[in-house]
Image (cartoon, rainbow, N blue to C red):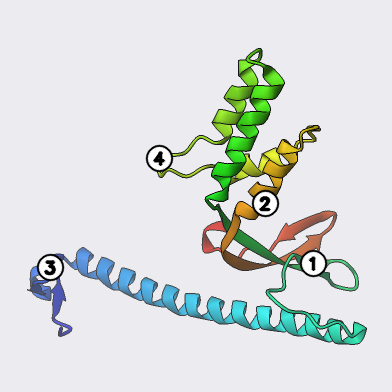
Amino acid sequence: MSEQHLLNPKGQLININNIRPADVVRHEFVETAVFKAQQMQKQLSEFKAQQMSEFDAFLDVLAQEYGVPMGGKKGNVTLRSFDHKMKITMQVQESIELGPELLIAKELIDQCLNEWSENANENLKLIIEQTFATDKKGKVSVQKVLGLRRLKITDESGKWQRAMEIIADAIQVIDSSRFIRFYRTIGEHEQAIPLDIAKL
């Protein structure tokens, strides 16, 4: 493609003399801006990788000082400057799914409900049904199901406790991501340093 022609949306070469000058200027601005954005994206990606590497290197030095080797992805750690005016956090966020064991846990929970309520309280059953309800993709809400494990329920038969153990076995980590964030304190207020251009 020569400097005297531009491609239109249909992939046709159009002579620049047949294009409105404003459209040519717009095209050049967009093309240049997107190119610069790609370069900035590359720099940010390299910056992130470098900072994560240095973060891990510091934790390795710390582990060596105590003689305790560390394995796996390092995360959920906060580092502060000596004056506490700046800090860096590293967080690991896991994506989890619930496996087929969930069906067995649901059966035990249903048995508990039938024994406890003796058909007297349909509200409790409704809450459980909502917890195990599936979305449009046929998936159960992980947060709702895991919320059951936080309930302090005493069951003499042990079925509820067993169901909670099975739910724990059903948890499958399918992916994990690490996020590094930077903060500074100005006056009395701690502020995140945004690296997302939309937040600047």
Residue 131 located left or right of residue 32: right
Sequence-wise, the earlier of marks 2 and 3 is 3
Question: Which quarter of the figure is the C terminus placed in?
Answer: bottom right
Callout 4: SS: loop
Q: Which residue is mark 2?
A: 168
Q: Which residue is mark 1?
A: 78
Residue, far front: 157
Looking at the rendered structure, the kind of residue marked 1 is Thr
Identify the residue at image location x=44%, y=73%: 37
Callout 1: SS: strand
Q: Give residue 185's position: percent from left, percent from top.
A: 80, 61
Sequence-wise, the earlier of marks 4 and 1 is 1
Looking at the rendered structure, the kind of residue marked 2 is Ala
The answer for how far apart the CA atoms under marks 2 and 4 are is: 24 Å
Callout 2: SS: helix
Disc 2 + disc 3, Cβ < 8 Å: no
Looking at the rendered structure, the kind of residue marked 3 is Ile
Residue 197 located left or right of residue 81: left
Identify the residue at image location x=68%, y=74%: 73
Disc 4: CA contacts within 10 A as few (<14), some (14-19) or many (>=20): few
**Is residue 126 placed above or below 20 in the rendered structure?**
above
Disc 2: CA contacts within 10 A as few (<14), some (14-19) or many (>=20): some
What is the count of numbered marks? 4
Q: Nearer the viewer, mark 2 or mark 4?
A: 2
Residue, far top: 120
